[in-house]
């Protein structure tokens, strides 16, 4: 393909909406980008955008592309305002997904003690009981909010239970992490009044989170319990992690621990309700639950992209990436690459070969993946037989805009058929 074809594509309203994160269904555009230029420079995003499976995979494994990328999140901030958000930036640099070795190796080793398959096994009865109770409550209503009452409520309650946070704090802490997540997922380099409002919200919510977690951590020091925060305090007391790293890991565990799972569950329910033949397969063969979860992750994964920062010059897909360049590795595009997946545009709960990258790759593979997979599997198992009775109020999905790092439904309501 020629440079002219890429220029024509970048000039379309669809491409511009994609860069502004306003394109509800980006997959046709991503297919075109992958075909025209699997690695291309986006002037609007001031970044390289990578859309092919092989090149995304290479990018995830290239040590010259680093995860310590707060410099990307803070692009465009006026010099006079940088200090105002310095505490927020420093906090994000202690999120596990924003670190590189040796810091990443040390923090990941700490996190691995708590976020592992054993945690999923330990909490399996709790998750099953919780889901059954929620579904029972839902059956007493004429209409249900699958997003708020199930997809969000389950993982938020779970991660609070695992961390050792009282339920009365759950809703406000969730709202604060959503605000901070907007900053963590920022790739747009422009600065205007909307950007400033987002930064101010993120900053205010971070300060509330910091104060709240400092209080909770002090309580855990005085009264230890069988929970993740108590273990983190013990690591701090042993000199393994700093106080800032405790708070960074705590907020990261909370934000990633329920936000990602919420989107896996909600996106999966939406896909099953809009693909009744696939839901029927699941109902008649519960053994397909595992492959159904993987297909949801591939087809509408919760994390569409990851941004990284080049610290050395490199070549990616034949393009010259310079040190200091931002690189967007588009996981969602890679997961629908027809060179890797047969009939890639089809949602197939029985798909066999499914080496998707929804949870990343290599040393940054998501430690919470076993927990997210388990919760989604339990929901699909328990609600599967009831799906034929549920009718979506709005069959066309409404996706949240403004955050390229999350594939999140804005609403998901349904009614029981009579």
Image (cartoon, rainbow, N blue to C red):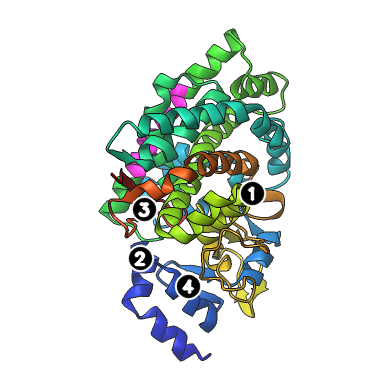
Which callout, 4 or 3, points to the residue nearer the camera? Answer: 4
Question: How many residues crowd around disc 2 within 10 Å: few (fewer than 14), some, or many (20 or more)?
Answer: some
- Mark toward the start of the polypeptide (3 vs 1): 3
| Mark 2 element type | loop
Determine which residue is flagged by label 3: 78
Give the alpha-carbon distance from disc 2 to disc 1, as whole Å: 35 Å
Between residues 67 and 38, which one lies in front from this camera angle?
A: 38
Which callout, 3 or 1, points to the residue nearer the camera? Answer: 1
Determine which residue is flagged by label 4: 30
Overall secondary structure of the magenta section: helix
Give the alpha-carbon distance from disc 4 to disc 1, as whole Å: 32 Å
- Mark toward the start of the polypeptide (4 vs 1): 4
Determine which residue is flagged by label 1: 287
Question: In the rendered structure, which segment of residues is drawn in magenta?
Answer: 199-212
Q: Are marks 2 and 1 in contact (CB under 8 Å)?
A: no
- Residue 55, image x and y in percent? 64, 71
Q: Say which residue appears at 53% left-offset and 24% top-offset.
A: 161
Q: Say which residue appears at 55% left-offset and 51% top-offset.
A: 284
- Residue 272, image x and y in percent? 45, 54
- Side of 129 relative to 17 (left or right): right
| Mark 1 element type | helix
Question: How many residues crowd around disc 3 within 10 Å: few (fewer than 14), some, or many (20 or more)?
Answer: few
- Residue 98, image x and y in percent? 58, 46
Give the alpha-carbon distance from disc 2 to disc 4, as whole Å: 11 Å
- Mark toward the start of the polypeptide (3 vs 2): 2
Between residues 370 and 92, which one lies in front from this camera angle?
A: 370
| Mark 4 element type | helix
Determine which residue is flagged by label 2: 23
Give the alpha-carbon distance from disc 3 to disc 2, as whole Å: 28 Å
């Amino acid at each position: 393909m020629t440079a002219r074809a890429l220029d024509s594509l970048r000039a379309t309203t669809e491409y511009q909406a994609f860069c502004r994160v306003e394109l509800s269904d980006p997959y046709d555009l991503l297919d075109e980008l992958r075909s025209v230029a699997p690695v291309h420079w986006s002037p609007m995003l001031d970044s390289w955008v990578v859309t092919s499976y092989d090149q995304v995979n290479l990018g995830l494994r290239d040590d010259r592309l680093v995860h310590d990328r707060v410099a990307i999140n803070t692009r465009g901030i006026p010099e006079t305002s940088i200090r105002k958000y310095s505490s927020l930036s420093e906090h994000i640099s202690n999120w596990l997904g924003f670190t590189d070795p040796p810091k990443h190796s040390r923090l990941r080793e700490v996190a691995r003690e708590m976020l592992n398959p054993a945690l999923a096994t330990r909490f399996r009865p709790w998750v099953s009981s919780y889901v059954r109770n929620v579904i029972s409550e839902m059956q007493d209503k004429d209409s249900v909010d699958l997003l708020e009452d199930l997809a969000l409520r389950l993982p938020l309650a779970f991660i609070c239970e695992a961390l050792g946070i009282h339920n009365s704090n759950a809703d406000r802490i969730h709202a604060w992490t959503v605000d901070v997540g907007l900053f963590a997922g920022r790739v747009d380099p422009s600065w205007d009044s909307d950007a400033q409002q987002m930064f101010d919200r993120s900053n205010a919510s971070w300060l509330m989170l910091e104060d709240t977690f400092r209080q909770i951590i002090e309580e855990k020091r005085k009264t230890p319990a069988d929970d993740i925060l108590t273990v983190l305090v013990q690591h701090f007391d042993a000199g393994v992690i700093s106080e800032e790293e405790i708070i960074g890991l705590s907020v990261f565990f909370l934000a990633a621990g329920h936000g990602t799972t919420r989107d896996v569950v909600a996106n999966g329910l939406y896909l099953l309700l809009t693909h009744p033949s696939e839901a029927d397969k699941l109902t008649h063969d519960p053994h397909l639950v595992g492959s159904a979860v993987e297909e949801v992750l591939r087809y509408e994964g919760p994390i569409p992209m990851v941004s990284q920062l080049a610290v050395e010059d490199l070549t990616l897909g034949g393009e010259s990436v310079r040190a200091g360049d931002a690189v967007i590795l588009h996981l969602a595009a890679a997961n629908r690459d027809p060179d890797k997946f047969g009939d890639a545009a089809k949602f197939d709960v029985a798909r066999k070969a499914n080496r998707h990258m929804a949870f990343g790759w290599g040393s940054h593979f998501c430690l919470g993946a076993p927990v997210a997979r388990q919760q989604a599997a339990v929901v699909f198992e328990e609600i599967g037989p009831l799906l034929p009775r549920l009718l979506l109020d709005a069959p066309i999905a409404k996706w949240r805009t403004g955050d390229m790092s999350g594939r999140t439904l804005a609403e998901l309501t349904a009614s029981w058929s009579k």
